[in-house]
């Protein structure tokens, strides 16, 4: 199941913004262009239940969450809704954290989706080889728990082309070749 942020849930920016606004600011946002998808707890629950009823097993269901929300706009709206002057509560941009993206993508590159009877649920057509990669990951984890961080990064990059570790893959090319050769045994 793939879906976005649930308003007010653990890890949501909403409680943090409320607290920062109540203190008079500043409100911290990572980047002026960052966007995220949001849904209500009720909507998330209903869609999860519907997915559970429709799922046949093994599918990746993607929820239609509408348009993404610009986080800086959310912060400004929350200041206004608190009855405060948005020009008096400062917004500070803290910078993206390692691995954080400016926008969420419900489908990875090369994936598409198929409709279901529910207008807000779709079945992801995962990239060829994705299931094989997951099986390889599980087998590798069971077999080689002592791998170092650099080796883990090489494996992840080979399985997930979009994976871009902070600072890049740090293992020397000769070692990476050895790791990948071992994987194919």
Image (cartoon, rainbow, N blue to C red):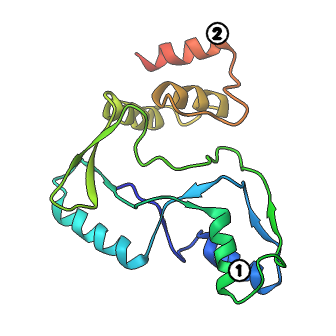
- Local secondary structure at mark 1: helix
Give the SS element for disc 2. helix
Residue where numbered disc 2 is placed? 174
Q: CA distance from mark 2 to mark 1?
A: 54 Å
Instruction: Point out residue 128 in the picture as x, y percentages from the top left corner.
Output: 31, 28
Number of numbered markers: 2
**Is disc 2 in contact with disc 1, using a CB cutoff of under 8 Å?**
no
Which quadrant would the C terminus be assigned to in this image? top left
Q: Quadrant of the N terminus?
A: bottom left
Q: Nearer the viewer, residue 166 or 141?
A: 166
Q: 33 above or below 81?
A: above
Above or below, 121 against 159 in this view is below
Instruction: Please give the residue where the numbered disc 1 appears in the rendered image.
Output: 79
Residue 150 is left or right of residue 10, and the answer is right
Instruction: Tell me the quarter of the picture where residue 135 sits.
Output: top left
Q: Horizontally, is 71 left or right of 36 in the view?
A: right
Tell me: residue 95, above or below residue 164.
below
């Amino acid at each position: 199941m793939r879906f976005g942020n649930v308003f007010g849930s653990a890890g949501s920016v909403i409680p943090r913004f409320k607290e920062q606004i109540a203190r008079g600011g500043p409100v911290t946002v990572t980047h002026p262009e960052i966007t995220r998808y949001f849904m209500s707890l009720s909507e998330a629950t209903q869609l999860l239940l519907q997915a559970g009823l429709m799922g046949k097993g093994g599918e990746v269901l993607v929820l239609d969450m509408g348009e993404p929300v610009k986080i800086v706009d959310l912060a400004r709206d929350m200041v206004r809704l608190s009855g405060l002057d948005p020009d008096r509560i400062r917004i500070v941009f803290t910078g993206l954290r390692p691995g954080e993206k400016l926008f969420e993508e419900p489908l990875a590159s090369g994936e598409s989706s198929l409709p279901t009877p529910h207008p807000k649920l779709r079945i992801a057509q995962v990239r060829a080889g994705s299931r094989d990669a997951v099986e390889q990951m599980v087998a590798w984890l069971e077999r080689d728990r002592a791998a170092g961080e650099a080796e883990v990064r090489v494996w992840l990059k080979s399985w997930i082309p979009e994976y871009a570790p902070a600072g890049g893959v740090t293992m020397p090319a000769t070692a990476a070749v050895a790791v990948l050769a071992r994987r194919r045994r």
